[in-house]
């Protein structure tokens, strides 16, 4: 009776899982840049996307607009053409095909953003910076050209209280003949937000509108011709020329019939002395306007400056205020880095994360695909109940395999994130190749446990006897195998701890992964060192063969789950192709277990058939299907696909939003979806409160979803979030309960 099937399997077959994990990691890394480039750049603070609007295609005389749409995280902002006291305007550098010429940014109306004693002019929420493009009359892309390649290098300064300079490179393939009008609404809104002239049909110069220099430090402004709707209202003034007025100062304004007048202090750091001063005027935004949509209309006027400018300050490449702020930020960042290197997170926070990881690892032993690995390991443990030294060595080796594997997987994830990859925990199962490889591995485990084949029958004796000759290595590899099957199940038990690892110094982050591994290995390690546990185990006997075959069924259940996951990624054809290949693999291992001439003939035929099946069906496994059917199914059930900025846009309209960050390979996600999220009372409460339902599917890699999770302090699924108008988002627990969801809905 074979007694150590899983040990031999760990030695000979774990290379499949290891290779799959490495392949998945490389795929995640290489997919960052493709031949087509990317039109979206996501950072922790903004999401920037290159958009186009060409309703009649790319042709001379037809409208063509390009633009950079920036969606800011709450409380963060970028800057207008005149940033105010501290900031830098967004800069766009275009690389366009011959015959296309980009104009200047048609800057939308900005907001005044007070920062302490300073005042900036910029944008919060979502803003589109549109640029008109002229198509030359001799534009000739060529008879075979279908697309025009648009490239943009953009740089922006994003600030809250601290300022972060960022940049991105964008590429967009713009169809030449067909219409591109998907973003028409966004460009129309940007056109309405662009200030028009005070008097229609003029270039902004308004007769009898002027700026008079008075007393050397005051600018008396008067503007005529403003719309009747503005008369009597308090206005904001945005000077297009930087470093002229005191942006943060309070000043007087009044109406004299149709003439608006104001007395505005000059800046102590004034460096410009324009003879013509362009300004933008708009109704003053209400206090607490925040990052919601700006419905004000702006009006531009060019004011003739009368009088003599006083002596100004020397011109600085960067405003003195911004330079001081950047130096302070640098000093603060340096101090924070030193502090982080020395202590990182607070001891209380780190201790909570480590304890959470340890507990999460313990719970992992009850997962369907992990439990058989641990159970068979413990059963093998009973065969040599008297050899306590061997037990302890085996326990240490198994623990080392588990802990080091979690550290290696965590280091790989942190390394990819540091290299700019938008990946999170469980990223390996976002690759169809990894899912298919694990399904093949578990099929072999199940066949071996069921007694269909034994490795000793067709492997060289030197390989088949590895376990007996190297029991320590065998235990180590068994630990590695346990991590391969357990890692996707960790997020429900330690989502906050995993999210924290992305913000910790690398040693502390890896310590959290090590604690997770220790929790997973702890039951077997305890059995290895505590004689009372060993004595409590059943004595060896015939029951072990029955138990071994019983463990084949959880493995087959895991295969079913993996096939379903692949179906979510590659469609029904991908799942069917994997099933066919698993049948072929089963035929090969069965044929190799035969004896005599039957083995020679059957093995030859089965291997040839398997090669043909791989050639015919393997491409279906990694094929990406269209998502139309999934989208239709989501719409039919009331759920809509999540998209960047969708929740914020719905909330801005006054409607609450519930977002389900999920993945097909996340067992807890599927459990919550079939139980709590399908509960009649929960669905009734959601409908009664007019809650919009969005589902962010992370089954395949999606950098935008990864960034959204990171902004919530998470890097794995499931994550459930309620967004509410005028209030911060509410993140629920990973294992949902009906009472928790209903209580949150009641507070909307």
Image (cartoon, grey):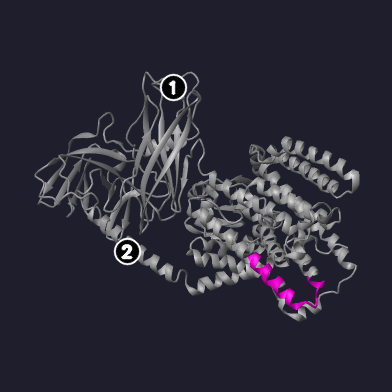
Between residues 193 and 178, which one lies in front from this camera angle?
178
Disc ID at residue 331: 2
What residue is shown at x 41% (from left), y 56% (from top)? 75
Q: Secondary structure at mark 1?
A: loop
Between residues 468 and 38, which one lies in front from this camera angle?
468
Q: Main secondary structure of the magenta part?
A: helix
How far across and down, in percent of the image, does residue 724 sit?
A: 52, 56
What residue is shown at x 29% (from left), y 59% (from top)? 325
Quarter of the figure with residue 456: bottom right
Q: Is residue 682 left or right of residue 461?
A: left
What residue is shown at x 78% (from left), y 77% (from top)? 387
How far across and down, in percent of the image, does residue 561 sit?
A: 74, 51
Which quadrant of the rendered structure holds the N terminus? bottom right
Q: Is residue 173 left or right of residue 459?
A: left
Quarter of the figure with residue 587: top right
Q: Earlier in the sequence, mark 2 or mark 1?
A: 1
Q: Is residue 393 magenta?
A: yes
Q: Is residue 62 left or right of residue 490?
A: left
Compared with 313, 225 (above or below) is above
In the displayed orientation, state which residue is furthest to the front: 462
Disc ID at residue 53: none
Residue segment shown in magenta: 381-402
Total number of numbered discs in the rendering: 2
Would residue 743 be visible to someone looking at this image? no
Q: CA distance from mark 2 to mark 1?
A: 51 Å
Per the image, the residue denoted by label 1 is 141
Quarter of the figure with residue 341: bottom left
Q: Secondary structure at mark 2?
A: helix
């Amino acid at each position: 009776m074979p007694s150590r099937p899983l040990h031999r399997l760990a030695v000979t077959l774990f290379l499949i899982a290891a290779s799959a994990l490495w392949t998945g990691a490389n795929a995640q890394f290489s997919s960052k840049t493709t031949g087509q480039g990317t039109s979206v750049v996501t950072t922790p603070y903004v999401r920037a996307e290159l958009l186009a609007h060409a309703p009649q295609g790319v042709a001379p005389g037809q409208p063509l607009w390009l633009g950079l749409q920036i969606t800011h995280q709450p409380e963060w902002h970028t800057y207008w053409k005149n940033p105010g006291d501290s900031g830098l305007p967004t800069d766009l550098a275009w690389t366009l095909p011959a015959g296309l010429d980009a104009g200047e940014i048609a800057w939308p109306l900005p907001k005044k953003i007070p920062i302490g004693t300073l005042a900036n002019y910029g944008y919060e929420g979502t803003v589109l910076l549109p640029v008109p493009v002229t198509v030359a009359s001799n534009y000739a892309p060529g008879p075979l050209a279908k697309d025009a390649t648009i490239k943009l290098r953009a740089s922006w300064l994003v600030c809250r209280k601290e300022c972060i300079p960022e940049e991105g490179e964008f590429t967009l393939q713009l169809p030449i003949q067909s219409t591109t009008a998907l973003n028409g609404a966004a460009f129309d809104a940007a056109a309405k937000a662009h200030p028009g002239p005070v008097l229609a049909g003029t270039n902004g110069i308004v007769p009898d509108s002027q700026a008079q220099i008075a007393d050397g430090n005051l600018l008396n402004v008067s503007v005529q011709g403003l719309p009747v709707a503005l008369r009597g209202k308090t206005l904001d003034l945005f000077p297009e020329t930087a470093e002229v007025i005191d942006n943060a100062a309070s000043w007087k304004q009044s109406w004299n019939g149709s003439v608006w007048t104001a007395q505005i202090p000059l800046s102590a750091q004034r460096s410009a002395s324009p003879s013509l001063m362009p300004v933008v005027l708009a109704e003053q935004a209400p206090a607490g306007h925040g990052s919601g949509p700006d419905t004000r209309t702006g009006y531009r006027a060019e004011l003739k400056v009368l009088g003599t400018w006083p002596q100004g300050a020397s011109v600085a490449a960067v405003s003195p205020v911004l330079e001081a702020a950047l130096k302070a930020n640098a000093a603060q960042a340096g101090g924070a880095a030193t502090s982080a290197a020395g202590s990182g997170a607070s001891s209380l926070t780190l201790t909570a994360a480590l304890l959470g990881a340890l507990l999460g690892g313990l719970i992992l032993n009850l997962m369907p695909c992990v439990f058989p690995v641990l159970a068979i390991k413990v059963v093998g443990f009973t065969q040599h109940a008297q050899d306590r030294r061997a037990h302890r060595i085996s326990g240490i080796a198994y623990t080392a395999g588990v802990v080091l594997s979690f550290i290696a997987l965590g280091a790989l994830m942190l390394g990819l994130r540091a290299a700019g990859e938008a990946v999170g925990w469980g990223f390996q199962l976002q690759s169809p190749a990894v899912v298919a490889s694990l399904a093949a591995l578990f099929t072999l485990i199940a066949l071996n446990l069921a007694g269909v084949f034994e490795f000793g029958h067709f492997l060289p004796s030197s390989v088949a006897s590895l376990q007996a000759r190297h029991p320590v290595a065998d235990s180590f590899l068994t630990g590695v195998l346990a991590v391969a099957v357990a890692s996707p199940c960790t997020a429900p038990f330690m989502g906050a701890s995993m999210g924290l690892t992305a913000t910790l110094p690398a040693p502390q982050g890896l310590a959290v992964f090590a604690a997770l591994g220790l929790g997973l290995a702890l039951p077997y390690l305890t059995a290895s060192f505590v004689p009372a546990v060993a004595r409590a185990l059943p004595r060896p006997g015939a029951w072990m063969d029955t138990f071994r075959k019983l463990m084949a069924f959880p493995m087959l259940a895991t295969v079913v789950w993996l096939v379903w996951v692949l179906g979510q990624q590659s469609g029904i054809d991908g799942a069917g192709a994997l099933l066919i290949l698993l049948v072929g693999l089963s035929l090969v291992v069965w044929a190799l277990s035969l004896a005599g001439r039957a083995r020679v003939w059957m093995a030859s035929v089965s291997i040839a058939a398997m090669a043909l099946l791989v050639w015919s069906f393997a491409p279906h496994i990694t094929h990406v299907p269209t998502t139309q059917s999934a989208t239709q199914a989501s719409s039919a059930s009331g759920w809509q696909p999540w998209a960047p900025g969708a929740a914020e846009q719905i909330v801005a309209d006054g409607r609450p939003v519930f977002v389900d960050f999920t993945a097909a390979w996340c067992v807890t996600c599927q459990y919550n979806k079939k139980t709590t999220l399908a509960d009649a009372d929960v669905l009734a409460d959601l409908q009664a409160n007019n809650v919009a339902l969005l589902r962010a599917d992370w089954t395949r890699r999606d950098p935008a979803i990864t960034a959204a999770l990171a902004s919530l302090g998470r890097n794995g699924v499931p994550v459930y979030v309620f967004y509410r108008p005028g209030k911060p988002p509410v993140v629920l627990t990973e294992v949902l309960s009906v009472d928790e969801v209903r209580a949150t809905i009641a507070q909307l």
